[in-house]
Amino acid sequence: MDRGSSKHSPRVDEQMSQEVSGLVQGPGTGGSRVDESRVPEPAGEDQPEPTTAPAGELRSGSPQGMTSEDVEARSRLGRFITMKSLPGDRAALLANARENEAPDDVLAALERLPEGTRYQTVSEVWAALGHTNETTRW
């Protein structure tokens, strides 16, 4: 009888097999990848549903001083400006954005940057385009 391991007992082999079965089988084999003992139980009849907003405070995930739309727009800009172009001036940023097949609106925004200024980060470019970055907490 081949158990697959001579280091452990059959009980330990079976336990180890169950621990990694979700990782080995993957999602396509029917069934959850989560061990049943790790799935949280639903709230009782007289219990409130769990929330990510303790004490009713809504948290959007965007940093203080920026909206989620600002974060998404800055992130989109950053997708077309890679680290190899930073620090860089307007010409370097435009060349890098064209290399990365940036859409016309991103190229038009970069063309509005003033000549002769070197930018260290995407946040500096974002601010130079007239937008606000997150505020720091002291």
Image (cartoon, helix red, strand yellow):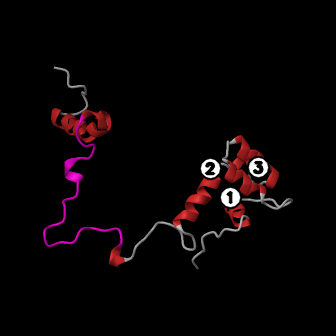
**Residue 65 coordinates in the image, percent (x, y):** 57, 74
Q: Quadrant of the C terminus?
A: bottom right
Main secondary structure along the magenta-highlighted residues = loop
Residue at disc 2, secondary structure: helix
Q: How far separated are the C-alphas under marks 3 and 2? A: 13 Å
* Residue lying at the far top of the rendered structure: 1
Amino acid of disc 3: Leu
**Residue 52 coordinates in the image, percent (x, y):** 35, 68
How packed mark 3 is, by other alpha carbons closer than 10 Å (few <14, some 14-19, many 20 or more), is many
| For residue 125, side relative to residue 114 (left or right) | left
**Residue 5 coordinates in the image, percent (x, y):** 25, 28
Residue at disc 3, secondary structure: helix
| Residue indicated by mark 2 | 79
| Residue indicated by mark 1 | 122
Q: Quadrant of the N terminus?
A: top left
Residue 127 lies in the magenta stretch:
no
